[in-house]
Amino acid sequence: MEVGAASKQSGPVEPLQRVAGRLLALAQQDWPVLTLAAVFMVSAALAELAIPVYVSRAIALATAASSSADGVAAFRAATQSLLALSLAFGLLSGARGTLFSVANQRLVCRLRERLFAALIKQPTEFFDNNDVGGLTSRLGADCAAVARAVCTNVNVLVRNLLQVLVGGVFLATLSPQLAFAAALASALLWLVTARYGRFSRRAARALQDATATCAARAPRRLRCRGMRLRCRPCWTST
């Protein structure tokens, strides 16, 4: 891992594909956890998509005003299926979140180990030109922010993409006109999301730089404040 003058200002922005490739290479060591989390994620997404179907079926059976044994049995089966799907969705979502959190923490530890190993190999002049507070901020906050890009953002991206694809196919079978309108709205939303994503990355980068700068300046300010407090009795005595 390369270490530059990161405590004062970040260097040039690397291509997103290159950064994502490095992160995925680091996350490959946790492939059993990520694979199991992906299975839970797909199952939870499918269960969430099936819940509205059984909700509408239960409502239709309840409003049909059929008091026959077949109508009551169908309504009971629909509500039981809805309850089972809701319970399965809750359990699968919890398992998915837990496994992705475990993978995220492991990736954070791995990033910090590699960054610390790169820092201790730097010459003495590197630490003379870079404040310790800024390096500590990079080692703490920045590694956690970078790791969230894999275990949180990728999780949300894949889950939403799966729901859009499966839900779009299901909606197209019900009403092609409504599916076309939803596709237009999704395309507009995608453009807005892409623009906001670029702004969010710039804002996060600026926030990390500002946090590192504050962490670098805080010890000097505290030392100056302590020197003033120690020198104040001398001033008052004179």
Image: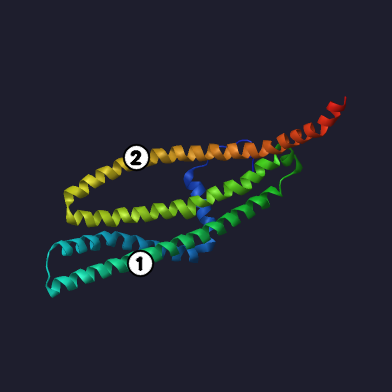
Q: Residue furthest top?
A: 238
- Label 1 amino acid? Leu
Q: Judge the density around disc 1: few (<14), some (14-19), many (≥20) Cα neighbours within 10 Å.
A: few
SS of the residue under disc 1 = helix
Horizontal side of 62 relative to 163 (left or right) equals left
The way the protein has been coloured in the rendering is: rainbow
Q: Residue at x 28, y 61 (%)?
A: 51
**Pointer 1 or 2: first along the chain:** 1
Q: Which mark is residue 188?
A: none
Residue 93, percent from left and from top: 40, 62
For disc 2, the marked residue is 191
Horizontal side of 236 relative to 91 (left or right) equals right
Q: Quadrant of the C terminus?
A: top right
Q: In the rendered image of this protein, does residue 1 appear above or below residue 230? A: below
Q: Judge the density around disc 2: few (<14), some (14-19), many (≥20) Cα neighbours within 10 Å.
A: few
* Front one among 214 and 151: 214
Residue 44 visible at all: yes
For disc 1, the marked residue is 87
SS of the residue under disc 2 = helix
Mark 1 or 2: the one toward you: 1
* Front one among 193 and 25: 193
Give the spatial CA distance, label 1 vs label 2. Answer: 35 Å
Residue 158, percent from left and from top: 39, 55
Q: Mark 1 near mark 2, Cβ–Cβ under 8 Å?
A: no
Q: In the rendered image of this protein, does residue 207 appear above or below residue 72? A: above
Horizontal side of 122 relative to 109 (left or right) equals right
Residue 15, percent from left and from top: 49, 42
Residue 142, percent from left and from top: 58, 46
Horizontal side of 17 relative to 171 (left or right) equals right
- Label 2 amino acid? Leu
Q: In the rendered image of this protein, does residue 228 appear above or below residue 188? A: above
Residue 130 visible at all: no
